[in-house]
Amino acid sequence: MGDFIVLLGPPGAGKGTQAQRLAQSLGMAHISSGDLFREHLKAQTELGKLAQSYMNRGELVPDDVTIAMVRERVGRPDCARGAILDGFPRTPAQAAALDEMLAELSGRVVSVPLIQVPAEVLIERLGGRWTCRAQGHVYHAKYNPPRVPGVCDIDGSELYQREDDLPATVARRIQVYLEQTAPLVDYYRQKGLLVEIDGTQPIEEVSARLLEAVEKARKAQS
Ligand code: ADP
Ligand code: ADP
């Protein structure tokens, strides 16, 4: 049975950074819905073109296509032992769909860490974020600089600044998070799965707290 971990938190909280580290520590797959959309965009698929119009405005891509895309991804063999979900679910309808798809796969959500960071910090983080073209690894000009400016430490590909990290779009994305995604906090709290994590600490500290929380939750449910 696969154990799935859902990372919740506003844009810029550190979900991608932490998902990648946690996936490595636990030997699990990392699924980022934003990265999946950006791959479609790069390949200019129909889904990519549709998603782009929403992403550029900081709006959510419609639930039906998002759910179908993630359903296909979690069904792949590398998720048989579970995965870290980063950026999905983002609406109550997506959370319900996740429960359904995991039931079909005999999987379960074991822990939902909420990475908490105040809005002013999010704006500074996204303003300094550099993302790798090949695999979406993220850096920060000040807090997590690459060894060589403009080049990904891990795969050597070029780093770029996402268009939706411009200040006007960031403000909209934070608002969308509060309106559409924040209700999931209660949904998972009621299920006893929510763990609050202070996301203002340095990256290594946040990773240590997260790993502790996830291991405790898995032990309690084994
Ligand atoms: P962030 O850095 O804010 O976590 P993501 O890379 O997760 O950004 O998402 C970028 C954009 O991709 C979102 O603003 C949205 O347009 C789209 N997107 C990603 N995941 C979802 C989702 N689960 N549902 C709808 N849209 C999504
Ligand atoms: P999200 O996926 O939630 O949008 P990211 O993981 O992409 O967030 O992080 C957003 C930006 O903040 C990136 O530039 C990243 O390097 C930086 N960052 C992530 N975690 C921390 C942290 N704990 N302290 C300082 N900067 C961080």
Image (tube, grey):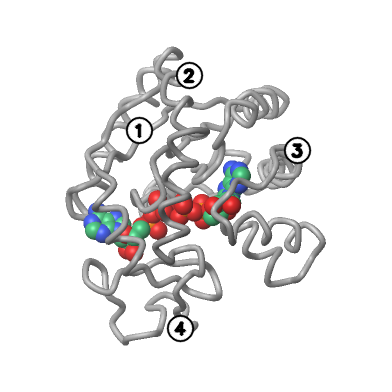
Q: Secondary structure at mark 1?
A: helix
Q: Secondary structure at mark 3?
A: helix
Residue 178 appears at what percent x and percent y?
43, 35
Q: Residue at x 58, y 49 (%)?
A: 59
Going from N to C along the chain, the mark reached first, 3 or 2, is: 3
Q: Which mark is residue 40?
A: none
Going from N to C along the chain, the mark reached first, 3 or 1, is: 3
> Where does label 2 land, which residue?
187
Using the image, determine if residue 155 lies above or below residue 64: below
Give the residue type that dot 2 points to. Tyr
Of all residues, the one furthest to the front in this rendering is 168
Which callout, 4 or 2, points to the residue nearer the camera? 2
Q: Which mark is residue 156?
A: 4
> Where does label 1 land, which residue?
214
Left or right of 97 in this view: 144? left
Q: Residue at x 39, y 26 (%)?
A: 218
Q: Residues within 10 Å of mark 4 (few under 14, many from 20)?
A: few
Q: Secondary structure at mark 2?
A: helix
Residue 18 appears at what percent x and percent y?
36, 51
Left or right of 127 in this view: 96? right
